[in-house]
Amino acid sequence: MLQLIDLEKHFPVRRGVFRRVVGHVRAVDRINLSVAKTEIVGLVGESGSGKSTLGYTVVGIHDPTGGGMEFRGQDLLALRKANPRAVSKDIQIVFQDPGSSLNPKRSIKQTLELPLRIHGIGNRAERLETLKELMRTVELPEPYLYRSPSALSGGQRQRVAVARALASRPDFLVLDEPTSALDVSVQAKLSNLLLSLSAELELTYLFITHDLSLMRNVATKVAIMYLGKICELADAQTFFAEPLHPYTQMLLSSIPVVSAEEEALKPKHVAPRGEVPSPVNIPSGCSFRTRCTHAMEVCHAVDPVFVKIQPDHEVRCHLFGGSKEVGGHAERA
């Protein structure tokens, strides 16, 4: 469905009275990632890792600095240039905060009807029936169509945001931390709704989050991102059973649990060390070396490449060797 090939997105850093460019933030730095049809790929990382920027680049909010993107085997940038409306119809996004992503001056009906008008879907009567069906799909009462966003709770507003994304009948959704602004109980309900919609409508998700425990129950594949790069990629079952990258182990060991059984599933505790470096001044070599308890001499000088541990498990770390590059990745030495 989606293929990212050495994708890059850099932002200039300007200083001084004349706003001269003095550097760049490599928010997305040579990302290679594939998302198959009906897959739910969890993109996980701390704040500032570049995961939201990656999602915004996929949906066209940002133009990439370099690399390429393919959608259904075709050049996504060329498709977007030739017919941007057709691409936006097929690729939609659900933002993190529904309080700011929904127009407070529009009713729910006006908000949901706008994508139908833009894409020329149905006449007036048909659009109204579509809106009612959308409300049923996201499990909201039909009378809510005539309310404003301020009259709804946070969870209800996020359901409206999901309905708006589904209005154009897309195949691919970028979910930018859709549950992080909600209470825990509401998070679970919305996650279950997104899972059922994925199965019912055969949707494909790029699910951006910082919550690894959520990904255990939702994702089919997990990618861990740190300072603009993916450091580990695996199918969800393998990922949680055998995390390899020191950063991944640190994230997993810090997940709060409530039972001894859950504690036994976690990797050995790895104490968080240091702070995330400034994206303007990323450390040389491996960007995680300043926080890694396994840092070696080579980590200071050489940026590691991906090593394929199993067909469905890759890691970018010097602990696992690898020198022969194959198609941008490396086979394990």
Image (cartoon, rainbow, N blue to C red):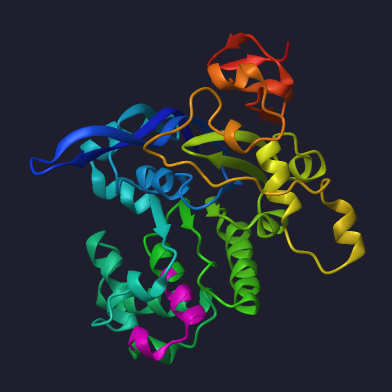
Q: Residue at x 49, y 57 (%)?
A: 175
- In percent of width and height, residue 168 lies at 37, 60
- In percent of width and height, residue 151 lies at 39, 91
- In percent of width and height, residue 148 lies at 33, 87
Task: State the predominant SS element of the stretch in magenta.
Answer: helix
Left or right? Give the position of 28 relative to 260.
left
Furthest residue toward top: 324
Label tally: 0
Q: Which residue is drawn at 43% across and 75% down?
A: 160
Q: Give the range drawn in magenta.
A: 148-161
Camera-nearest residue between 208 and 139 = 208
| Vertical relation: 230 (above or below) 167 | above
Q: Looking at the rendering, which quadrant does residue 209 occupy?
A: bottom right
Left or right? Give the position of 275 relative to 109.
right
Residue 259 visible:
yes
Left or right? Give the position of 164 relative to 292.
left
Q: Magenta stretch containing residue 29, yes or no?
A: no
Left or right? Give the position of 308 relative to 118.
right
Task: State the quadrant of the C terminus.
Answer: top right
